[in-house]
Amino acid sequence: YGFINTCLKSLVVEKYGEETWEKLRLQAGVQDSFLTFEVYKDEITMQLVDKACKILEYFFEFCKRSGYDHMLRTLGGNLYEFIENLDALHSYLSLSYQASPSMNYRVEKNEDGSMHLHYYSDRRGLCHIVPGIIGAAALDFFNIEISMEIVNQTEEEERTGKKEHIVFLVTQNPVFSYKERSEFSCPSQYLDDADKQVENQANKEDLEKAKNTAKDRGSSVCPVKKSHWKTIRGIITLGKGKLLRGFDPVYPKSLWIDTKTFCNGLPFHMVFDKELRVKQAGVSIQKIVPGLQTTGICLDQYFCIVHPEVPFTISSIQKFINSQFVFQTRREMMPESWKHRPMLELRGQMIWMEPLQCMLYLCSPLLRTLHELEERQMHIADIAPHDVTRDLILLNQQRLAEMELSNQLERKKEELRILSKHLEEEKKKTEALLYAMLPQHVANQLKEGKQVEAGEFKECTILFSDVVTFTNICAQCEPIQIVLMLNSMYLRFDRLTTVHDVYKVETIGDAYMVVGGVPVPVPTHAERVANFALGMIIAAKGVQNPVSGSPIQIRVGIHTGPVLAGVVGEKMPRYCLFGDTVNIASRMESHGVPSKIHLSSSAYQCLKYKNFEMTERGEIEVKGKGKMHTYFLIRNKTATENEIMGRP
């Protein structure tokens, strides 16, 4: 069930975080979440356990947190009783987890105080979980530490359909705290003077017995009850305040109930001997299985044992006498009216009557819902008024409706989680697209509906580039060839903007514009743009001219100065730069030389002492600006080509 896989996920997330769980589930190749009442393949759990390894005691803790704490605590007063009643708990839980494979526990006391725990399971490989779960329960509920070792591991032959039978040797060590030792004695102020002596004597006996037992037992002890019962266990008040040790039941000299009343009052019961011959049966079971009215018929002719899966012999039944037994009617022996109905199942306990050498089976119909009752054409009236099966059917009907609602909510929650995850992924894609068009802080302001104020940047470096003879190329090529050429070139340039952390402002035809120091001011804006420009020259050599087939040539111009930057427009808004610095940078590009990086004097001054090799071009006439002293950028003296291109 998903409950088990959810337990493992909870352990990993709680102790190691979501990232570790994500890594674990990817390695195991399983989904992210599991529905509690959904049945999953064993392979999923095995793969998760194989990757996570140490889940043993956490399962017990997870069961407690999931609301089973009180249920587990009330199973027994000591570990022996706790294990002895685990089968009854599994029987109850099967109401919710109907597809859960069967497993059984059988426990035997040894003379030295240890126990043999027999574990039976339909599935192999899960026995190693048992010591962790039982050990956690022993420590939490009974304050004892236990050790468990496998003494036998076989395929059980005497059980039908079971694949694995493991026998554990359980030895127990009590953990006595000071508080518990102090609880050995009861406050004597509540007793009469006459009774104090009796109580003190009892306490001395208990203390002496506990000391001797602890001294002798070593690592193996008898099942230990809760400490506050150590002195008052078995003490009952009779008459005028007399305290007596132990309890002796009183039985009548003869049974004050006649046979007819007994069979009517317990309508679902059967008595059979060692040869399985039926001696008596309740009236309701006789009504359903008329063959039981024939004295001396064999019980195994009409019923088979469903749980525990043992052969139908008196010796097998005696071995599992503390387990709940489930009988199922045999179809071939049922009346004609039952031929097309589901078979009736009975659940109850076995009681061996030594004087009579007979077995009493006190049982009730195993019915979980009104639908199962109707399928067998039975009624509530067929069940004895004192039988809690009546209440169980009605309560379980309501619980099933609530469980179905819970399942629907769980599925909806899972659908919402998946939708939310997909929405988050789409949101990231949208944001990535938006951040590719606008600076991140500007995009965030626009998303929040804020007005983006124009900003003045006192110093930045702007670069322009274009393709040499682009007009001629366009005249001699198909439009698609131009698009492919520009796309190939711009993809290389875009990658370089990430490598050198410069901002791409826009592209217009074959013109490419970037800026350093905007929108985030940085002192190294000139070096970044210079390295980017060197990378552009190298990258352009990898783009083919569709006319000549040779690498294309580009002109690059760089200028440093102040600008004003802001968002322009509402539809398809753009982050634009304004100022004379933009014009001069454009002039540097248009008055440049193919495959050269043309620098203004201000850009040259910024790079002068930054390990760049530059040559002087001299004074040139610049349109609209008159004469300007310019330079060419040759190379970076300290960076390799791989570093410039961002290659590993």
Image (tube, rainbow, N blue to C red):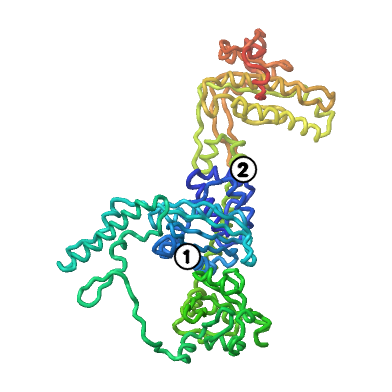
| Residue contact at pointers 1 and 2, CB within 8 angstroms | no
Residue 175 horizontal/vertical position (percent): 36, 51
Q: In this view, does 185 lie to the left or right of 59?
A: left
Q: Which of 161 and 284 is in front in this view?
A: 161
**Residue identified by numbered label 1:** 84
* Residue 429 disc label: 2
Sort mark 2 into few (<14), some (14-19) or many (20+) by Cα contacts within 10 Å: few
Q: Distance between the residues labelled 1 and 2?
A: 58 Å
What's under tag 2, amino acid-wise?
A: Lys
Which quadrant would the C terminus be assigned to in this image? top right
- Out of 288 and 261, give the one closest to the viewer: 261
Relative to 469, residue 60 above or below: below
Check the image and report above or below for 124 versus 232: above
Decide which of 580, 149 is in the foreground and name it: 149
Nearest-to-viewer mark from 1 and 2: 1
The image position of residue 343, as x and y in percent, is 63, 79
Which label is found at residue 539?
none
Q: What element carries label 1?
A: helix
Give above or below for 384 relative to 530.
below
What's the amino acid at mark 1?
A: Glu
Residue at image position (58%, 90%) is 293
- Check the image and name the residue furthest to the left: 193
Residue 22 percent location from the top left of the image: 57, 45
Q: Does any portion of residue 381 appear in the rendered image?
A: yes
Above or below, 146 relative to 102? above
Mark 1 or mark 2: name the one nearer the start of the chain. 1
